Image (cartoon, grey):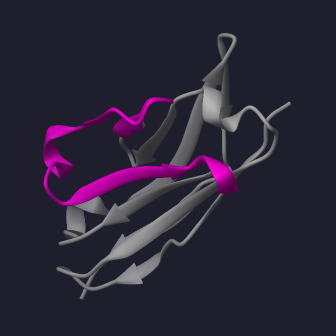
Amino acid sequence: QVHLVESGGGLVQPGGSLRLSCAASGSIFGLYGMAWYRQAPGKQRELVARITSGGSTIYVASVKGRFTISRDNAKNTAYLQMNSLKPEDTAVYYCNTVIYGANYWGQGTQVTVSS
């Protein structure tokens, strides 16, 4: 069983920054990719960024150049650095990993971008 716990969300003004963290249980963290998804009210959950076990990354077009996904395998933690935040980034952000075909999700952390 894998447990994921997100933290770091909050209220920020447009143009501001936040760093989300995803702490994972278990000793196999470094073997698997990690991803951040988000879900805005009335919208489907969407992939924001993904990082492989080797450190390769992909981003959804709307966050490229503003968000950075990273991981610290020694701390069993993944991060999402979010800069130049926009109101349309407002959503609940979820951490995700897939292990042996099973999806694991955190409880989510709210990010609100508003003046």
- Residue 98 relative to residue 51: left or right: right
- Residue drawn at x 36%, y 64% as measured from the top left: 81
Q: Position of residue 57 (x, y in %)?
A: 31, 36
Is residue 44 visible in the rendered image? The answer is no
- Residue drawn at x 47%, y 38% as measured from the top left: 35
Q: Nearest the camera: 43 or 96?
A: 96
Q: Position of residue 86 (x, y in %)?
A: 19, 69
Query: In the rendered image of this protein, does residue 33 appear above or below residue 35?
Result: above
Q: Position of residue 37 (x, y in %)?
A: 44, 42
- Residue 58 relative to residue 25: left or right: left
The residue most toward the right is: 1
Q: Nearest the camera: 71 or 81?
A: 71
Q: Quadrant of the C terminus?
A: bottom left
Q: Nearest the camera: 82 or 88?
A: 82
- Residue drawn at x 28%, y 81% as measured from the top left: 114
Q: Quadrant of the N terminus?
A: top right
- Start and end of the magenta stretch? 47-75
Number of numbered markers? 0
Is residue 108 visible in the rendered image? The answer is yes
Query: In the rendered image of this protein, does residue 88 appear above or below residue 32?
Result: below
- Is 50 part of what is drawn in magenta? yes
Q: Position of residue 3 (x, y in %)?
A: 78, 43
- Residue drawn at x 68%, y 31% as measured from the top left: 104
